[in-house]
Image (cartoon, rainbow, N blue to C red):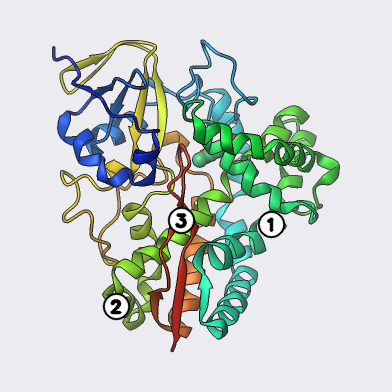
Amino acid sequence: MKEAPRLDIDPFDDQFLADPYAHHDALRDAGAVVWLEPIQTYAMARHAEVAAALRDHASFCSGRGVGLSDFAREAPWRPPSLLLEADPPLHDRMRGIMNKIVSMAAIKALRPVWAARAGELVDRLVDRRWFDAVADLGEAYPMAVFPDTIGLPVEGRENLLPYAAAVFNGFGPRNRVFDRGNAAAADAMAWVAMACRRENLRPGGWGAAVYEAVDQGECTPEEAERLVRSFLSAGVDTTINGIAHMILAFIRHPAEWDRLRADPSLAKRAFEESLRWDSTVQTFFRTTTRDVEVAGTTIPAGAKVLLFLAAANRDPRRWDNPDRFAIDRGTSGHVAFGYGIHQCLGQMVARLEGELLLEAMTRRVAAIRPAGEPRRRLNNTLHAIDSLPVEVVPA
Ligand code: OVM
């Protein structure tokens, strides 16, 4: 039996968070399982082991939290998510309710309205020529379509952004990044709590639909409130940064934009590849429920294990030329949406947003060029951009 190599790498310090990809080789090359001295947990960064751990939810559980904090030892900073931070059977019962709401039919119904909004937005941006791909596109588009779909109050929606940033910081340690984000988010948390209440959700929206499950006897009102909160936690900052990194991918690989314009039917694959190339959710933890052997190393029961989703998505053991964004690459098996029973509930929402924006842009934009240095925003879980100035050349 091998000991896990001990590494002096802190995946939550400023240098790591500012450029995680610079550190992934060291994590992957050290071994299939490593021990991270600064945070005192195990970690895995190779595709095979990350995917296997995600698949094995019985050995690698989520109910003790998917952040650094172990809910069996310390009280969670917010009431745990009934999806993300739950195990079967509770998880499956809650997920069943949500799957019926975020269904293929529901997504299909959104498409015409969301496509029209994408077209209007892209028209305006192309007229302007210079814009910020974070504020004006990455934020503007999800904020124009997603809160209406949930049925949220119109007043105060800007609170969704600091709220989500705080949630994703909360999966890391109580470091400076966490303190900074959470101090700013106190009001936002109060707004979100208000917005999740039944009387504040527009009839016909996905939020109200969760409460209809209460009327059907499928869950309690308290559970419904917590499930609506999951839409607000997971649905905004993820897609914002996914869209921003999709634009960044094309800026860094301009020939791919020409290929997409030559064959716009590649839009779906291009968005998927951008998620593999830069995975918004960089990491999640699991906790072992028993002694687990991974590639000759035993991880003891009750241990936190950090899974580097983004590193798995660029593991050269799995992908050819992994740092290259190639829109016609086969991306199946990427873990940007996770894998197994917890695989992203909103993945079809994210794909619809990415695909509709790309479709709108391929018709109107001949080239996308950088118009200034991107500015990063440090977050303990998300690879986030604050600003990405671009220039578009009209088609
Ligand atoms: C939730 C939740 C929060 C953050 C992320 C997430 C990526 C889910 O509250 O359920 O999924």
Drawn side of residue 297 relative to residue 117, left or right: left
In which quadrant of the rendered view does residue 106 lie? bottom right
Question: What residue appears at the point 75 percent right and 40 percent down from the top-left corner?
Answer: 196
Q: Residues within 10 Å of mark 3 (few under 14, many from 20)?
A: many
Q: Earlier in the sequence, mark 3 or mark 2?
A: 3
Work out which quarter of the rendered image holds the C terminus and state it.
bottom left
Tag 1's secondary structure? helix
Find residue 245 and name its label.
none
Contact, CB < 8 Å: mark 3 with mark 1? no
Alpha carbon of mark 3 to alpha carbon of mark 1: how far?
A: 19 Å
Amino acid at circle 3:
Gly
Alpha carbon of mark 3 to alpha carbon of mark 2: how far?
A: 20 Å
Question: What residue appears at the point 37 percent right and 15 percent down from the top-left corner?
Answer: 303
Q: Nearer the viewer, residue 320 or 161?
A: 161
Find residue 149 and name its label.
1
Amino acid at circle 1:
Thr
Residue under numbered circle 2: 259
Measuring from the top left, give residue 248's x and y in whole percent: 39, 64
Drawn side of residue 132 relative to residue 21, left or right: right
Measuring from the top left, give residue 258's x and y in whole percent: 31, 80
Residue under numbered circle 3: 242
Q: Residues within 10 Å of mark 1 (few under 14, many from 20)?
A: some
Q: Earlier in the sequence, mark 2 or mark 1?
A: 1
